[in-house]
Image (cartoon, helix red, strand yellow):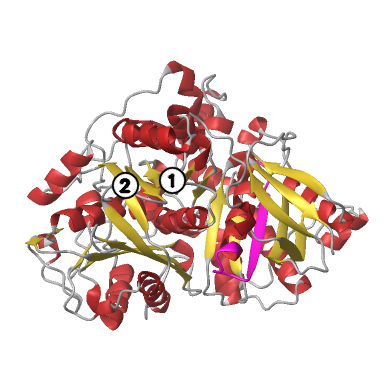
Amino acid sequence: MRRPYPITAFSLTCGLGETTARCFAELEAGRRGLREVPFEVPFSTVTGTVPVPLPALDASLRHMSSRTARLAAFGFQEFAPAITDAIERYGADRIGIVMGTSTGGIDRTESAYAQWRKEDRFSDDYAYATQHPFHGFTDLLAALSGVTGPRWVVSTACSSSAKVFASARRLLDLGLCDAVWVGGVDALCNTTVRGFHSLGVMASEPCRPFGKDRPGMNVGEAAAYVLLEREARSEPKAWLLGVGETGDAYHMSSPDPEGRGAIAAMKRALADGGVTPGDVDYVNAHGTGTQYNDASESAAVLGLLGGEVPVVSTKGYTGHTLGACGGVEAVLAVHALQNGFIPGSPWSAPLDVDVHVPAAAQRTPVRHVLSNSFAFGGNNCSVLFGRSDAR
Amino acid sequence: MTNENTGANASAMPRLAIAGRGYWAPQVPNFEAYFAGTRHEEAVKPNCSIVASRMRRATSTLTRMSIDAATEAAKSADLALDQFACVFGSAHGEIQIAVDQMEMMHEGEGQISPARFKNSVHNTAGGLFSIAAKNRGFSTAIAAGPDTFAACLLESALLIGTGEETHVLCVIGDEALPAPIDRFGSHTSQVVALILASAREDQPGFTLRTGATALPEILHTAEPALRLVRALDEGAEATLPIGRGLSATISPAS
């Protein structure tokens, strides 16, 4: 077993809503956050687009601006009090920032490149060194918050912001930080929307994870933040109990059909938490809605956990937020634990899999949630969260 | 309120040694050549021979040279390719493929190549290496700008310090920026790969410490890794800045 760490704060901005409360309200109402793509693409699809315009950064921070940076800053508005409080208690240099992303500020370079192609020059306000890089938005978050501890970005595609929980746990285990601000930020951009379309896995309609004849995935965007601390001052929101990180060593963009790497990741997360397969009350599946992912993941879940445990892909609500999905689904897992709420997946019927994908939302006690994130390169991460009374 | 961070619980940080090393640059395709100061007259391409040719297609110089350096490091540590955790770091990532894709968006119907897209992620080198090496263990890909090596080294040390891993491959580097964005940076293609493990008492080692540190300008992502190797080879007591807020205390063999 590994030492559990308390989750003391969280926030979410995604296609479901611009605030955490709105995201939860939409989820509980069974409404999806899938809508029009916020830029022109040469095919039809829908995306999990944040439903409000993202404000510009303050003039002093424009040299760091990208859609990802603006999304990161927008999401931070709600999370800021938790960080201010943590700085008060621990000091700015005792707080780490470890974030997941798959795109960084690439959307800014896309627009700068388009201008260069048209006018043979880059605009004066394009700053590659601070707008483009993966880690740019973490520098922005540090500037906005005053946090000065270790910070980096994990970018293992769609498992990025699940793996940050393991990085944070290590920083806490060895006493290098007293709190670690984790999560993920990825904004919609041409590279990912056109890229997944090029692979033939993009749905032109809202996705139907685990459904028969499912049409594929929808890309989404999000800023999801979670604060982990060494000790909680009061009852935590939930516990980080376990993380399993493995590789398929199978294929760059397709999962091992037998799900061996996924099973190994889930087993490690459960072993960390001292939890048996029968103790898992809900699986927040990776569930991209593609043929290969859903078949492989359901085989892995069925093999390890059986066919009774509810398995839901919240990507049916948010779209696939890529490097942010582990963070998004961590927040949704905490919501399930705090409120005894498992979302429904009515669009998935009829099912194509043997795991239990409930069509209707359920109100039921939820003590342990296993949240899966699987990525290009066969990079797997499974995270186990426990209810506040689970430790 | 801020605390003076002196690296609380620093005793828990492991004393590490470099058990294997690899290097690749277009005219300097291994660590032996790097230290000997010998350069090929003409640039050579990384052959990336451990990866099947069908998977090597549409990969970048960054991915190929990272895999070659990783393979050299494992060989020099006398480790099979599936016997260690993998930490890959790059500040700019798959920038050549990213720019290629941006050009494709403006050609024909604006579709991008699926072969390029699947190799465009930051963990492409780590993913392809794991497939070629049949390594089903831990693998991550990190970015932190000029502090990318510091972050990779810290994550590697944490993996060993928590007892999760005994050996960690840490690969750090970047490829040169492609046109037209090469006007924003002039670094060359270069990668360093290190196999890290707990240091024995009879070998030089280093311990990472967090806290304020004076930093020289980092001109290449791989540069602090080369400085660390040199300092360990010299084996004298020293404190070496690695990145923002991270230094390595070098200690000689006892």
Magenta highlight on residue A358: no
x, y (%) of residue A4?
Answer: 38, 61
In magenta segment, residue B165: yes
> Which one is nearer the viewer's eye here, B112 or B25?
B25
Q: In the image shown, does B124 or A92 lie closer to the viewer? A: A92
Q: Mark 1 lies on which chain?
A: A
In terms of secondary structure, where does tag 1 sit? Answer: strand
Q: Which of marks 2 and 1 is nearer the N terminus?
A: 2
- Farthest top residue? A59
Q: Which amino acid does label 1 sit on?
A: Ala
Q: Residue at x 14, y 54 (%)?
A: A339
Seen in the picture, residue B113 relative to A383 is either above or below; the reply is: above
In this picture, residue A108 sits left or right of residue A315: right
- Rendered image: mark on residue A179: 1
Residues marked 2 and 1 touching at CB (< 8 Å): yes
Q: Mark 2 points at which residue?
A: A8
Residue A166 pos. (x, y %): 45, 59
Residue drawn at 45 percent across, 62 percent down: A376
Q: What element carries label 2?
A: strand
* Disc 2 crowd, CA 10 A, few/some/many (<14, 14-19, 20+): many
In three-dimensional space, the C-alpha distance between marks 2 and 1, rounded to whole angstroms, equals: 10 Å
Magenta segment boundaries in residue numbering: B161-178
Along the line of sight, the residue nearer the viewer: A45 or B148: B148
Chain identifier of the residue bearing label 2 in the image: A
Disc number for residue B244 = none
Q: What residue type is labelled 2?
A: Thr
